[in-house]
Every structure is written in C-alpha cells, then in structure tokens.
Image (cartoon, grey):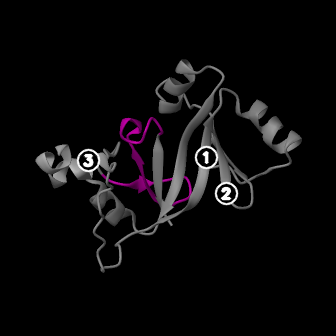
Amino acid sequence: MLRSVLGASARRLASGPRLARRRYSSEPPLWRLGKLNHVAIAVPHLDKAMELYRDMLGAKPLPEHGVTTVFVDLGNTKIELLEPLGENSPVQAFIKKKPEGGMHHICIEVSNIAEAVKSLEGKVRPLTPEPKIGAHGKPVIFLHPKDCNGVLVELEQA
C-alpha cells in the first residue's frame, strides 16, 4: 500500500543511492596528466639532508639549480631538496612553521600546461597568474593547496 502511494520516486530512494552518469565527450582532451615528476622536501640544512639521501640511501644528486635546490634522481622520479634562501623565501616561511622541514609540494607533468591552466579556471586557483620557468627549465605553475586537499601541487610542462 505504502509503495503505491509514494510512487516511483520513493522506490528509487529505497533501492539505494544512484551514481550520476557522466557524459564523456568524443573529443580528445586538450591536455593529459603525466607522471609524477618529483616530490619536494623543504629542509633547514641541505648538507645534512644530502647525507641521508646520498650517503645512506645511495641516491645520486643531480646538478644543483641555483644554491638552494638539489634534485635526487631515483630513476623513475626525483626528490627535490629545498633549502631557503634568505628570510623572504617562501620556503623559509614553511621552515618557520615546521623547523625540521617536511614535504613541501608534489610536481606532476602535464602534456599542455596552457590548456591545463585554462581548464582549471574557476575550480582551482593558481598561485601566479601565468606559468613561470621552473628548475627544469620548463613552464610550471603552482596550484593553491586549499583547492588541492591541503597539498601544494606544481604542474610542469612535460
């Protein structure tokens, strides 16, 4: 009796949640996510951090980019060690909050950074209005951690 009074809507609700159907375009996407390029770790003392990664774990440092960045090559990805350069460094602000250092950001390659940024408009805030040239000499842009579940995400042109 109750079923006939409530009708089809009640029967659908009673049968459990329904997942929304996604509509997929037949058009190929303008950009794609690539591999994890690196995980960046902010460190208060680069020399001490290198002892761990080079001497204890056998990682091979890549040539330095400037005086505050060392890339540790792991074969399929890299670890980027970041030491702050002066009090105005954004990495210094991170070290003030976490004096022992810690994971600063992840970097993911994208096939077309301009299209990636365009498609994220209104969904995820970039930290800069335009991509800049990053440590690998390629365009990069950082995405606001508040829009990425608390993680600072760097997108890098593959």
Circle 1/circle 3 CB separation < 8 Å? no
Q: Which residues are magenta?
A: 130-151
Considering depth in this image, is 51 or 154 the residue closer to the camera?
154
What's the CA distance linking mark 2 and mark 1? 8 Å
Number of residues whose C-alpha sits closer than 10 Å to that of mark 1, classed few (under 14), some (14–19) or many (20 or more) = many
Q: Residue at x 26, y 47 (%)?
A: 13
Q: Residue at x 18, y 43 (%)?
A: 2
- Picture quadrant of residue 22: bottom left
Find numbered disc 1 in the image and state the secondary structure of the residue it sits on.
strand
Q: Residue at x 31, y 44 (%)?
A: 125
Left or right of 18, for residue 60: right
Would residue 41 be seen by someone viewing this image from the given angle? yes
What's the CA distance linking mark 1 and mark 3? 44 Å
Q: Which residue is mark 2?
A: 77
Disc number placed over residue 65 in the picture, else none: none
Q: Position of residue 146 (x, y in %)?
A: 37, 35
Find numbered disc 2 in the image and state the secondary structure of the residue it sits on.
loop
Q: Is residue 27 above or below residue 94?
A: below
The numbered mark, 3 or 2, whose residue comes first in the sequence reads 3
Circle 2/circle 1 CB separation < 8 Å? yes
Q: Residue at x 31, y 72 (%)?
A: 24
Q: Which residue is mark 1?
A: 39
Q: Which residue is mark 3?
A: 13
